[in-house]
Amino acid sequence: MKVYTGTGRRKTSVAQVRLLFPGNGAVTINKKPMSEYLPVEINQILAIRPLDLVKMDGKFDISVNVNGGGKSGQTGAIQLGIARALVSYSEEFRSKLRTAGMLTRDPRMVERKKYGQKKARKRFQFSKR
């Protein structure tokens, strides 16, 4: 059994993905089945989208360790990790994944809160008198 690895990051989430080939399509995230760890169906679809794109769904067993952030950020991290692992499996997937934007790390992070303000950009109510 051959193992292909990839690391994905999104916001403050980090996902370490291992693709086990050959496999039967089982996806485990933090030692739980994907449907249990990500109960929202859109997150499940987005997480394994790179496999659907290169038509390799059902050919790998996927084991993921993910921590940090929330479920949406973790989903994005898993997606990037799977895409990178697929490229390490076969370099010919790179162009298809690149055009779909799966290999690009999303750089957006939460802006820090500023002093004298309520949040990062929201200010306290101004009173003229």
Image: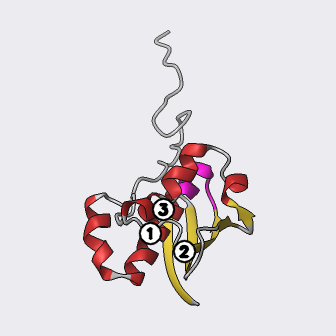
Task: Indicate whether residue 72 is drawn in magenta.
Answer: yes
Tag 3: Cα neighbours inside 10 Å, few (<14), some, or many (≥20)? Answer: many
Q: What stretch is highlighted in magenta?
A: 68-75
Residue 22: in sight, yes or no?
yes
Report the mark closest to the observer, 3 or 2.
2
- Label ID, residue 79: 3
| Dots 2, 1 in contact, CB < 8 A | yes
Q: From the viewer's perspective, tell me whether residue 48 is left or right of residue 40.
A: left
Q: Name the amino acid, label 1.
A: Met
Q: Name the residue under label 2.
A: 60
Between the residue at mark 3 and the residue at mark 2, the CA separation in whole angstroms equals: 15 Å
Residue at 59% in and 44% down: 41
State which tag comes first along the sequence, 3 or 2. 2
Of callouts 3 and 1, which one flags the residue occurring earlier in the amino acid sequence?
Answer: 1
Task: Report whether 105 appears left or right of 126.
Answer: left
Q: Is mark 2 on a helix, strand or loop?
A: loop
Residue 13 percent coordinates (x, y): 57, 61
| Gap in angstroms between the C-alphas marked 3 and 1 | 14 Å
Q: What residue type is labelled 2?
A: Phe
Q: Residue 10 vs residue 30: left or right?
A: left
